[in-house]
Amino acid sequence: MIAHLKERGVKVLTDNVSAVKDADIVLLVVKPYQLADILSEIKSTLKPEMIIVSMVAGFSLSPIEAIIGDKIPLFRGMPNTAIALCESMTCLAYDKKWEAYKDEVFGVFDLLGKSVVITEELMASATVLGACGIAFALRFMRAAMQGGIEIGFAADVAQFITAQTMKGASELILQSNHHPEQEIDKVTTPRGITISGLNEMEHQGFSSSLIQGLITSFKKIDKQDK
Ligand SMILES: NC(=O)c1ccc[n+]([C@@H]2O[C@H](COP(=O)([O-])OP(=O)(O)OC[C@H]3O[C@@H](n4cnc5c(N)ncnc54)[C@H](OP(=O)(O)O)[C@@H]3O)[C@@H](O)[C@H]2O)c1
């Protein structure tokens, strides 16, 4: 499945021990049910000069440390699928004792999007807001497109207008650090069209349903965390 990466100079191996042997940073990006077996497989090859970063959702640092020991720098990351375009939001957690390795780890993730340090206790929340958040934002996009078609656009044009508008809205916030309502105020004329639509969305439960969705995902993930 990753054989095509060979053409781009990536060393592709099928043996985990060989893959880890000469690594500086080992990224664990496998399904949660595979992690314990893979850690046991590579454990004796890991060295304190390496850094381990686990991206496995729902798996805390402590059970990993219980397998690999406490001498190897260990980080936990929660990216999202926009990592494929180097536009991930990656939340990273680690024990304070590994502070000296932080810059090296961030050096990798800053190339793949934006990153932020969080406490490990917030990892489930980061999964919901950042990783599930991609799906939540795209459901907003789909709904806006459906509305766009009803008011006259062909699906492909509605998709283009909606996607670029969402990108522009995100950039307005990322570049100015303004609160969203500050930018909303700029497009809501008194007695105008935008505020009528916004208020109707709120009457229909827009913000409330989004918040309840986030909380529902959080409750589910929190129960599953190891
Ligand atoms: N998807 C997300 O948005 C997201 C976000 C944050 C965190 N995560 C976490 O990232 C992890 C991976 O998720 P994913 O969606 O990327 O899953 P995925 O697409 O199924 O990728 C799993 C990878 O593990 C490889 N693999 C399978 N068995 C292996 C083994 N025995 N040794 C070494 N590698 C093995 C697979 O290679 P082959 O395909 O060649 O078998 C595949 O490249 C999960 O723990 C997930 O919770 C995902």
Image: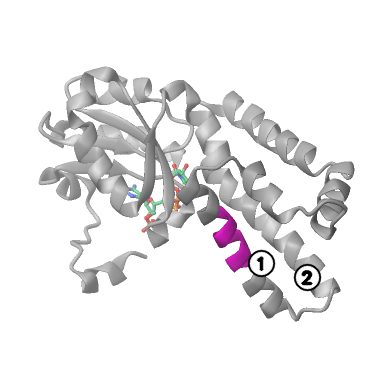
- Tell which circle, 1 or 2, labels the residue nearer the N-terminal end: 2
Cα separation between marks 1 and 2: 8 Å
- Mark 1 beta carbon near ligand 1 (under 8 Å): no
Kindly identify the amino acid type of the residue bearing the numbered disc 2: Gly
- The secondary element bearing badge 2 is classed as helix
Across and down, in percent, residue 145 comes to 74, 67
Quarter where residue 12 is shown:
bottom left
Across and down, in percent, residue 40 comes to 27, 32
Query: What's the magenta bit mostly, secondary-structure-wise?
Result: helix
Write the start and end of the magenta stretch as one range: 162-170
- The secondary element bearing badge 1 is classed as helix
| Whether residue 42 can be seen here | no
- Which residue is denoted by mark 2 in the rendering? 148
88, above or below 214, in the image: below
Question: How is this picture coloured?
Answer: one colour
Q: Does the magenta stretch include residue 168?
A: yes
181, above or below 102, in the image: below
- Mark 2 beta carbon near ligand 1 (under 8 Å): no
Q: Which mark is residue 162?
A: 1
Q: Do the residues labelled 1 and 2 touch (CB within 8 Å)?
A: yes
